Image: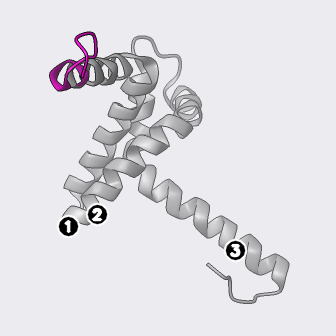
Amino acid sequence: MTDNEPGLVQQALFFLAMIGAWIAGEAGRAALAGAAGGLVRWLMSERRRIRDGVVSVIAGALMARYASPVMLALLERWLGEMSGDVGGAAGFAAGLAGMSLAKLALAILDANYRRITGGGQSDA
C-alpha cells in the first residue's frame, strides 16, 4: 500500500459520509419516512415476527419511493391544500399502507391474468 492510498478508516468514513448525504437528500428522507411507516404498521400488527418486520420496513421504503406522489395527491384531495413537509407525510403514509397496497396491486394483476387466460392457474 502506498502512502497516498486511503486506509480502511478513511474509506469507512467516506462511505458513512455518502450514506449521510443520501439520507439528507430527498430520496433518503422519503425512504426513511416510508421505512418508519412500515415499522409502525408492523408494530401495530397482532403477530410480530422479525421477518415480517424486515419485509414491512423494506416494503414501506420502496412504497414511499415510488408511491409518494400518488399518496400526496390522495392526501391533498382528502385533506385539502397542505403546507410544510408534506412529502415526508406522504412517504410515511405510503410506507404505512405499503404492504396493503402491494397485496392489492398483486391481487389486481392476478385477477386480470386469470380473466385474460380464462381462469387458469398462474405460474407465479
Residue count near mark 3 (Cα–Cα under 10 Å), binned few <14, some 14–19, many ≥20: some
Q: In this view, does 56 lie above or below 121?
A: above
Along the line of sight, the residue nearer the viewer: 1 or 83: 1
Residue 26 coordinates in the image, percent (x, y): 44, 19
Give me the disc on residue 52.
2
Along the line of sight, the residue nearer the viewer: 25 or 72: 25
Q: Is residue 12 above or below residue 53?
A: above
Q: Nearer the viewer, mark 3 or mark 2?
A: 2
| Residue in the picture at 83% in, 86% down | 118
Residue 20 coordinates in the image, percent (x, y): 29, 20
Sooner in the amino-acid sequence: mark 3 or mark 1: 1
| Residue in the picture at 48% in, 44% down | 63
Q: From the image, tell me which residue sits under label 1.
A: 49
Mark 2–mark 1 CB contact (< 8 Å): yes
Residue 88 coordinates in the image, percent (x, y): 39, 25
Residue 93 coordinates in the image, percent (x, y): 41, 38
- Colour scheme of the picture: one colour
Q: Is mark 1 on a helix, strand or loop?
A: loop
Q: What element carries label 3?
A: helix
| Residue type indicated by callout 2 | Asp
Residue range of the region highlighted in magenta in the rendering: 1-11
Give me the disc on residue 111.
3
Q: Is residue 8 above or below residue 82?
A: below
Spatial CA distance of label 3 from label 2 is 25 Å
